[in-house]
Image (cartoon, grey):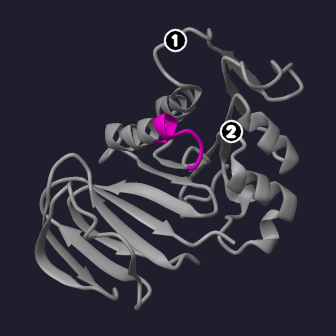
Amino acid sequence: MNNSSKISRCLVILSGEAGLERLVQNGCSSVEVWPDFSSYDFVIAADRGQIIARDLGIIPDVLVGDFDSSPRPDSTSAAEIVVFPREKAFTDSQAAIDLAFERGWREIDVLGGLSGRLDHTMGNLGILAKYSGRARIQFFDGLNIVTMLHPGSHLMNARGYRYLGLIAYGEAVRGLTLRGTLYEVTDFTLPPDTTRGVSNEITSDPASLSFREGRLLAINSRDPG
């Protein structure tokens, strides 16, 4: 039973990209940006994500995918296994996140999905747009944390990352005000066709951010190495 004051969170584990391989090799405790994986209430692994889960000592509650890039699991690998055909109109990543939302999770952290194939990365940003305003979803891989913000006021923590990047998604973000950052703005319009919002830094943790219109990709990042 979850403590009533605790926010319940779901972890979705995707494929083994370079950043995730470093996590497995180094151990989560040696890298400050990794969360405590034991703190999640529910874990879903998508296809090859089962290998990352195994190497981290995590037994997923659900395994999903077509399993074209990893061995098809047996009943000892997870409490539940959901198998999709290889020919389908969505990725295993989307299947896992959709399942998390359908099961009632509204705080979803997604490990991976950022630094592999660009088409998959762009598709994952679309998943953020799909659930914007309905769930808090963030992708992270040790180099980046990416989430999508809807209009309103937000606190932005550095969380061990040097940079804060802000990118308007699909349309202009209007009324953007930033405080506690190296570059502050007031009632600013950030169009979607500019790099104006990248490589900012949080100078007062947490920084504050607000805007009236649009959707905003917020990216905490650090240099590799």
Query: x and y percent of residue 130 in the render?
Result: 33, 37
Instruction: Name the residue beneath numbered marker 1.
Output: 88
Q: Is residue 194 left or right of residue 57?
A: left
Res. 29 image quadrant: bottom right
Nearer-the-camera pick, 178 or 99? 178
Q: Is residue 144 left or right of residue 38?
A: left
Looking at the rendered image, the quarter that the C terminus falls into is bottom right
Please name the amino acid that badge 1 sits on. Lys
Q: Is residue 25 left or right of residue 207?
A: right
Which SS class for mark 2?
Answer: loop
Q: Do the residues bearing badges 2 and 1 touch, measured as CB atoms within 8 Å?
A: no
Query: x and y percent of residue 188 in the render?
Result: 12, 73
Q: Considering only order in the chain, which callout, 1 or 2, is on the residue closer to the N terminus?
A: 2
Magenta-span inclusion, residue 117: yes
Q: Residues within 10 Å of mark 2 (few under 14, many from 20)?
A: many
Res. 131 image quadrant: top left
Nearer-the-camera pick, 40 or 124? 124
Distance of mark 2 from mark 1, alpha carbons?
18 Å
